[in-house]
Image (cartoon, rainbow, N blue to C red):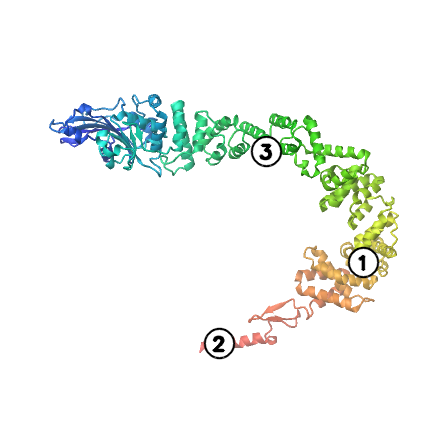
């Protein structure tokens, strides 16, 4: 979209009929199309030539009066150049002047030209138009002789030009900030003022430069609304002294003095660049830095009021001036603050490419990597990660203590990239000090790099020697991408040390205290002294999970090679005795025909005596059975009795589960001679047999034949079964049905036990629902019709109010489930009868 042209206005003393008002006098002589009253008022207020009264009184020649240039923004931009003409149009009085002004509301009309550069632009006019209408001035106006190159050369030619430009630019840079002060130039010639102002505004972004209002010259600086003013020494008086504060920053160009000015960061950054480099490139960098700040501030911010940061300036300098030195340390932090917009996307890759060649600081690279994640191409990201890897390798090799970095946010390496990254690690590893090897390989792992350990084999062996001499160094190769190779080397080194001395106390202690944690996954040779020590230490000191994993792996070897049973037993339980469960697992791993190691029997007897001296458990009984099968006598008469009774119980359960192939229920096996202690140990299996493996018609006769011990067991365990909310619903109702039938059996069971069981069933009825009770009825019906009828009568008896009516006053009337008594029968319900009488009485009273 093309920028609009400037509106043009000419102001002077007119003859009658020459100006817009028609009459004679000072007025706008002509204007271009589209100029409104507001634009004319703004020009009249801020841009007209000011003739010095004192000089007019002295009747100085008009040629001695300097021209003026003024610029202001107040809703619209106005730039005006004026000249003194001397006598008025009628030739009577002095004071005539001619002002040519241009105005626009669109800052793009100026192009890249700063208003001060228009001082001697060729298109300014000092002549009235033939009519009251004049043509506009084209956008992007030519600046005349004050080009960027000439201004740059002029500043460089001035004594202390860099210092003066730093001061002037610092003062101009603060104009719209919180520390703003107006600026006053003292000069006999307006052109040096214009040149310094041009140079200072060239180092501002265009949107900011256009907001710097100035008037050169002025006769009354106190009453001017412009920020920068030029004043002739004849009119300055005491204001020309930089040491006195009249509210202005004073630059006295006559005596070469200026007020004390603290340089701004922008001035210290850009002025040396302007002096030493191509000024057009510097202007581009200034503009880009301002664009960064504007985009970060958001669409609602005033672009002219936004100030760039040191990061903005350093980033733009890297892109436009190809000087990445300043941005290298700031780039990561700066990028994190930027919105992910089109402007950033256009410059981010040149920025990264510019800094990568010289940036070696790991912290700065890591911050940069975080900031550009997802914003740059994959190839550039790989370059960044390689640079970061190199920096982190240096940090790992030099820092005290070594730094193990966090992983970079990168994707997978391509094979080519991975080869380059691995070469970096391998080259560093060849000469690394042993104490730095861990930090180096942890760095490689963090970057997803797996170096070839064989390429630095000598350094790896030096590290193993150093490590075995310092086992408490806290090294853990499991965290390294090439850690398996180092664990293998450690295993080989320790194995070699045990060849001549299988019981080397130093190695034994080191393995027990430290190295078993690393070596137990590879300890699979039960004939190796080292592996035996590793297994023993892992079983002794490992977590419960590690202990079980080691035992499982060792028992798997026994299952494959039974001849290793004794070695396996010694390896596992050399330092830590087995638990009952581990003992059972070991015996199970042995073939049934193979004798157990001789040391197993005494240990088993001791374990059983320690854990269950008087009451066996299921696992105790399993161990006794396994010991018996593996020809191991533990020499305990009591345990032998438990084993005998357990055998009977196991036979009973096996027979119950195969009842369809066995004699009728009346000839089913019995538990009368089984010890109650053994029966209790297998209680879960017994209840499961009766509820899950046989029908009710098969379970009830078995209970009847088994005597009081089974009754006592069912009294304890059946209520637990139906109270278990997580149990299968069918199993729970089956437990109720079996319990009910058990209470109806005749036999030698204690009456109190069956009464307790009946009470438990009654309690279940109270809390059960109709569906559950009907399922129990259906189960009992499969036994016989009589049992179902007795259950129905028992469940519907007066003791079980599972049905109710809610009374009118919140009371619950419990009734029997009997067809002869109905809650809705008025003759049987006094409350309903009284309510009926009360309703009738009220109805008769209403009719009266």
In the rendered structure, the answer to whether residue 182 lies left or right of residue 842 reads left
Q: Indicate the quadrant where residue 244 lies.
A: top left
**Residue 140 in the image, given as x and y percentages of width and height:** 32, 25
Q: In what element is the residue under mark 1? A: loop
Q: Indicate the quadrant where residue 612 lies.
A: bottom right
**Residue 63 in the image, given as x and y percentages of width and height:** 19, 23
In the rendered structure, the answer to whether residue 285 lies left or right of residue 745 reads left
Which of the two discs, 1 and 3, labels the residue nearer the N terminus? 3
Q: CA distance from mark 1 to mark 3?
A: 64 Å
Disc 3 + disc 2, Cβ < 8 Å: no
Q: Indicate the quadrant where residue 781 lies.
A: bottom right
Q: In what element is the residue under mark 2? A: helix
Q: CA distance from mark 2 to mark 1?
A: 76 Å
Q: CA distance from mark 3 to mark 2?
A: 101 Å
Residue named by callout 2: 842
Which of the two discs, 2 and 1, labels the residue nearer the N terminus? 1
Of 795 and 621, nearer the camera is 621
Identify the mark at residue 399; answer none if there is no mark.
3
In this view, 840 is above or below 544: below
Instruction: Say few, some or many: other residues with alpha carbon within 10 Å of mark 2 (under 14 / 14 to 19 / 20 or more).
Output: few
Instruction: Give the mark toward the camera: 1 or 3.
Output: 3
């Amino acid at each position: 979209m093309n920028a609009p042209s400037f509106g043009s206005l000419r102001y002077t003393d007119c003859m009658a009929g020459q100006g817009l008002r028609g009459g004679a006098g000072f007025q706008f002589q002509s204007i271009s199309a589209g100029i409104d009253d507001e634009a004319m008022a703004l020009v009249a207020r801020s841009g007209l030539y000011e003739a010095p009264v004192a000089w007019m009184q002295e009747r100085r020649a008009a040629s001695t009066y300097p021209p003026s240039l003024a610029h202001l923004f107040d809703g619209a931009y106005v730039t005006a150049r004026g000249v003194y003409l001397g006598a008025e149009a009628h030739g009577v009085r002095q004071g005539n002047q001619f002002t040519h002004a241009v105005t626009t509301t669109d800052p793009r009309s100026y192009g890249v030209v700063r208003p001060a550069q228009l001082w001697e632009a060729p298109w300014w006019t000092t002549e009235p138009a033939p009519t009251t209408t004049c043509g506009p001035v084209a956008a992007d106006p030519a600046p005349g002789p004050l080009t960027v190159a000439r201004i740059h050369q002029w500043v460089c030619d001035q004594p202390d030009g860099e210092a003066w430009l730093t001061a002037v630019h610092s003062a101009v840079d603060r104009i719209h900030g919180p520390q703003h002060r107006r600026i006053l130039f003292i000069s006999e010639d307006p052109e040096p003022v214009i040149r310094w102002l041009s140079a200072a505004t060239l180092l501002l972004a265009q949107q900011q430069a256009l907001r710097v209002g100035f008037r050169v010259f002025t006769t009354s600086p106190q009453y001017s609304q412009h920020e920068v003013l030029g004043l002739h020494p004849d009119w300055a008086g005491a204001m020309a002294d930089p040491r006195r504060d009249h509210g202005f920053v004073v630059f006295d160009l006559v005596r070469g003095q200026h007020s004390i000015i603290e340089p701004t960061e922008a001035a210290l950054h850009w002025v040396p660049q302007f002096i030493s480099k191509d000024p057009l490139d510097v202007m581009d960098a200034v503009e880009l830095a301002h664009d960064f700040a504007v985009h970060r501030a958001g669409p609602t911010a005033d672009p002219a009021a936004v100030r760039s940061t040191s990061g903005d300036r350093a980033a733009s300098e890297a892109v436009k001036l190809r000087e990445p030195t300043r941005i290298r340390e700031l780039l990561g932090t700066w990028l994190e603050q930027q919105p992910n917009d089109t402007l950033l996307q256009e410059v981010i890759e040149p920025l990264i490419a510019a800094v990568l060649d010289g940036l070696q600081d790991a912290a700065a690279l890591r911050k940069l990597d975080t900031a550009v994640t997802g914003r740059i191409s994959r190839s550039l990201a790989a370059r960044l990660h390689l640079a970061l890897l190199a920096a982190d390798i240096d940090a790992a090799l030099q820092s005290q203590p070594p730094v193990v970095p966090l992983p970079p946010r990168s994707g997978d390496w391509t094979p080519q990239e991975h080869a380059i990254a691995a070469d970096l690690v391998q080259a560093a590893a060849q000469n690394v000090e042993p104490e730095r090897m861990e930090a180096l390989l942890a760095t490689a792992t963090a970057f997803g790099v797996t170096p070839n350990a064989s390429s630095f084999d000598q350094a790896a062996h030096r590290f193993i020697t150093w490590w075995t001499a310092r086992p408490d160094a806290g090294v853990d190769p499991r965290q390294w991408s090439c850690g398996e190779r180092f664990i293998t080397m450690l295993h080989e080194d320790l194995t070699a040390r045990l060849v001549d001395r299988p019981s080397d106390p130093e190695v034994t202690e080191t393995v027990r205290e430290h190295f078993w944690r690393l070596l137990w996954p590879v300890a699979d040779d039960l004939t190796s002294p080292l592996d035996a020590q590793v297994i023993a230490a892992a079983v002794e000191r490992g977590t419960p999970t590690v202990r079980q994993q080691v035992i499982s792996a060792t028992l798997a070897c026994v299952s494959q090679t039974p001849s290793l049973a004794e070695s396996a037993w010694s390896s596992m339980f050399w330092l830590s005795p087995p638990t009952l469960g581990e003992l059972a697992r070991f015996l199970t791993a042995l073939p049934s025909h193979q004798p157990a190691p001789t040391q197993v029997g005494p240990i088993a007897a001791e374990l059983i005596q320690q854990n269950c001296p008087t009451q066996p458990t299921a696992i105790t009984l399993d161990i006794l059975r396994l010991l018996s099968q593996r020809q191991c006598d533990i020499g305990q008469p009591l345990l032998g009795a438990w084993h005998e009774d357990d055998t009977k119980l196991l036979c009973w359960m096996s027979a119950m589960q195969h009842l369809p192939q066995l004699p009728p229920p009346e000839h089913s096996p019995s538990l009368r001679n089984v010890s109650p202690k053994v029966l209790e140990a297998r209680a879960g299996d017994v209840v499961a047999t009766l509820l899950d493996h046989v029908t009710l018609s098969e379970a009830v006769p078995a209970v009847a034949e088994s005597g009081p011990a089974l009754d006592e067991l069912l009294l304890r365990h059946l209520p637990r079964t139906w109270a278990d909310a997580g149990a299968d619903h069918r199993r729970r109702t089956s437990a109720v049905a079996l319990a009910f039938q058990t209470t109806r059996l005749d036999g030698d069971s204690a009456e109190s036990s069956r009464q307790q069981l009946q009470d438990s069933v009654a309690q279940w009825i109270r809390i059960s629902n109709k569906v559950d009770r009907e399922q129990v009825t259906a189960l009992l019906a499969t036994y016989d019709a009589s049992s179902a009828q007795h259950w129905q009568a028992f469940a519907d008896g007066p003791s079980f109010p599972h049905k109710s009516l809610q009374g009118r006053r919140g009371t619950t009337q419990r009734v029997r489930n009997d067809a002869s008594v109905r809650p809705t029968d008025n003759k049987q319900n006094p409350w309903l009868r009284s309510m009926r009488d009360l309703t009738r009485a009220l109805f008769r009273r209403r009719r009266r």
